[in-house]
Amino acid sequence: AQKVTQAQTEISVVEKEDVTLDCVYETRDTTYYLFWYKQPPSGELVFLIRRNSFDEQNEISGRYSWNFQKSTSSFNFTITASQVVDSAVYFCALGPGGAGSYQLTFGKGTKLSVIP
Amino acid sequence: GAGVSQTPSNKVTEKGKYVELRCDPISGHTALYWYRQSLGQGPEFLIYFQGTGAADDSGLPNDRFFAVRPEGSVSTLKIQRTERGDSAVYLCASSSGQTNTEAFFGQGTRLTVV
């Protein structure tokens, strides 16, 4: 069974602070994919990143960075110098590897509020 | 349009009624997905189409739920004899169909059963 746990339900930070959103996953698959999505108040899920289970290199994209650690089954997301526009619900998701891997298992999300 | 379009954006219906929710995927996307998001939860998978056929409908909660995609483009999610527990945001997504390519989500239809 696939499971994604986002233990932080809500986080509030003051603008320009750094913030890390935690994600822990469970899977029996040897090949899988991990995702982060952002859901602003408009409701649309916005894709942020997809990471293959074989690639444990950390990734940085502007103010966003991701730390994938297979040993602890974690895929944490850090926003540096947070901005008010970062306020949203962030979802971590797990997808099976291989052909036809389309079904994502989402965590419950972390609501981030960035206070000006 | 450029993105996934879902209509209506909001739907209020009485318990026991039938509803249809529509999804217009991104042009050329062969894969289409329906998810359901209850309040305070992450989206839950319902059904996946590859072209016109439902490749996996294992997430549909019961036989009151049905979805079609007759021409491989627009999809309709149909719910019969709605119940208050069906109230949720129903999200549609599409992708190019290649393995694990990015799925683009629509803004969802908020269904309220009263």
Image (cartoon, helix red, strand yellow):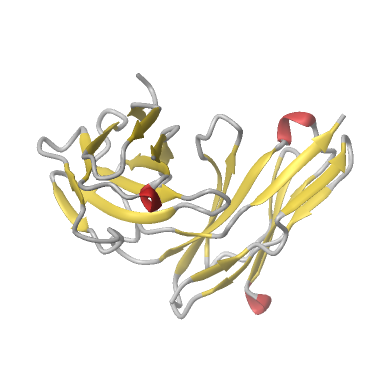
Query: Going by the image, does A44 lie left or right of A114?
Result: left
* For residue B17, above or below residue B41: above
- For residue B62, what is the image quadrant? bottom left
Query: Going by the image, does B44 lie left or right of B20?
Result: right
Query: Going by the image, does A63 lie left or right of B110?
Result: right
Q: Quadrant of the C terminus of chain B?
A: top left
Q: Residue furthest top?
A: B1
Q: Tell me where residue A83 appears, x and y as whole percent.
A: 80, 32
The residue lying toward the viewer, choosing from B95 and B5, is B5
Q: Residue at x 31, y 47 (%)?
A: B33
Q: Residue furthest left?
A: B70
* For residue B10, above or below residue B84: above
Q: Residue at x 42, y 35 (%)?
A: B108
Q: Tell me where residue B26 appears, x and y as whole percent.
A: 32, 30
Q: Residue at x 31, y 37 (%)?
A: B14
* For residue A17, above or below residue B40: above
Q: Quadrant of the N terminus of chain B?
A: top left
The residue lying toward the viewer, choosing from A27 and A58, is A27
The residue lying toward the viewer, choosing from B34 and A27, is B34
- For residue B6, what is the image quadrant? top left
Q: Tell me where residue A49 appears, x and y as whole percent.
A: 56, 48
Query: Going by the image, does A100 lie left or right of A49?
Result: left
Q: How many marks?
A: 0
Q: Residue at x 28, y 47 (%)?
A: B82
Q: Tell me where residue A71 appears, x and y as whole percent.
A: 66, 79
